[in-house]
Image (spheres, grey):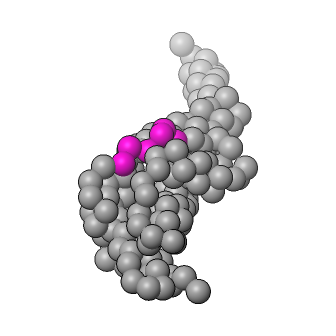
Amino acid sequence: MNKKGIFSAIVAIAAIITVAAVIVSASAPAVSAENNNYAETVLKTKKDWSNLRYLLDKALSDALADSVDIGSCTFMQSNIKITNYLNDAKDSSFSECGFTVPQISGPQDNLLVTLTISCSKTANRFTASFQKQAEFRKAIVSGGSPCNITVTDLQSGQTEIDWTAP
């Protein structure tokens, strides 16, 4: 090969490498954007799950307090009433989430409520789903005249409801 041929080969190889680098760098933002969309969808799904769990936790306390018969000041556990209360609390902002029928067990001063919460979101061509069982521990104390109802979250130790009938 003569000197012109070597120079031409080097220029041709440099041009091929430059074209390849441009192609790779041009496609990288598209892949990165897809990864960002997927990551954002996953984060939104988990955020919705967490927000719904918090909402159901607070609605459960309301449902338990509302399950006390004011006349006799006695807790009347009603799984149907509690489930309906939770369904009413879940508004349209959680349309991509749902939960199973709550399972309620234990005595009034140490109720265990378990249910499975699941959320799913679709963005572009990605679908992210998250499902996990949630447990809530509550204590309901009712008594006195007039009737006083106290609901305590046993997991945090916080009194969530302290209400006395008029």
Q: Which quadrant would the N terminus be assigned to in this image?
A: top right
Q: Quadrant of residue 107?
A: bottom left
Name the residue: 51% across, 72% down: 70
Which is nearer the eye, 126 or 102?
Answer: 102
Instruction: Locate residue 64, reporting x and y percent.
Output: 47, 62
Q: Magenta span has 14?
A: no
- Judged left or right of residue 137, residue 71 is right
Name the residue: 41% across, 63% down: 75
Magenta segment range?
A: 99-104
Which is nearer the eye, 1 or 47?
Answer: 47
Q: Which quadrant would the C terminus be assigned to in this image?
A: bottom right
Q: Quadrant of residue 85?
A: bottom right
Which is nearer the eye, 94 or 79?
Answer: 79
Which is nearer the eye, 45 or 164?
Answer: 164
The answer to whether one can see residue 47 in this image is no
Instruction: Locate residue 23, reporting x and y percent.
Output: 66, 31
How many discs appear? Answer: 0
